[in-house]
Image (cartoon, helix red, strand yellow):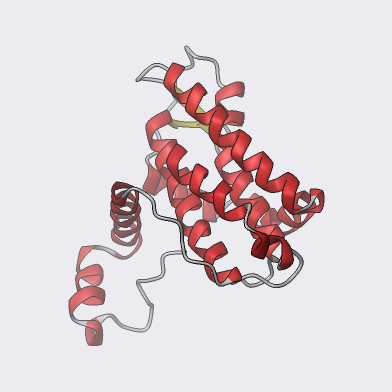
Amino acid sequence: MVEAVEAAAELMGRPSVGVAWDTPSALEGMTVGGLAAHLVRGAGATIAYLDRTPVDAQPEGDLLTPVTYFHAALDSPIHEQVKKVSSDESAIGHEATAAKCADLATELSRRLADEPADRLVGALGGRMLTLDDFCRTRLIEVLLHLDDLSVSVGEPRPDTDPLGVSIVIDIIGSIARHVHGDWKVVYALARSERVGEQAVFPVF
């Protein structure tokens, strides 16, 4: 995840992003600046959740997984507030947002190295998941929005470790299986004529 945030900071620092800052992005309802701010906020949630979750915190129920996290997040009221919050946070401007992303990458590199392997974080109303799994949810956010930002400004997507994309594919496929069942996913991949009216992909 740290490498992906570093790549995002490099892309955000390019002049083309600054030129397009207030223009529409590849995501409907978001400017380029709003998209960049949203990416930084999504990655920065890792630090925020670590700060507010005690190291010795224990879950009251089952831990969330990346799949159940996204399933719950999409139904959360906060999901509808994303565009406005992102727009507001982009008001600091291009250079400040790019610098914020670079600082975040440095902080993540330092902070994650110091955390114990069994560290938990509270998210979505305090429901808990492992730090590793939360980082996987952030990896999806960062890599997808890194691509969104690249497309928005007509820049090549920065290279990142292929392992990150493999993790994203695995989780997205698992979300589709969770929502639609295994056979619908098989049909979507190999027998599209049998999928039915409800599309399997995209999952969000």
> x%, y% of residue 97?
70, 47
The vertical placement of 119 against 134, above or below, is: above
Q: How many marks?
A: 0
Q: Quadrant of the N terminus?
A: top left
Residue occupying the point 37% across, 71% down: 201
Q: Is residue 135 above or below residue 68?
A: above
Say which quarter of the image contains residue 118: top left
Q: Is residue 77 visible?
A: no
Residue that lies at the very extreme toward the front in this rendered image: 15
Q: Residue lying furthest top in this view?
A: 56
Q: Indicate the position of residue 60 as horizontal and vertical percent values.
A: 46, 24
Front-most of residues 49 and 186: 49
Which one is in front, 38 or 188? 38
Residue 114 figure quarter: top left
Residue at x 44%, y 51% (from the top left corner): 140
| Residue 128 appears in the rendering | yes
* Residue at 30% from the left image edge and 55% from the top image edge: 174
Which percent across, then down, holds residue 41?
63, 44
Q: Is residue 176 above or below residue 76?
A: below
The reply, left or right, for residue 65 in relation to residue 44 is left
Residue 145 picture location, percent across and down: 53, 58
Give left or right: position of 123 versus 84.
Answer: left
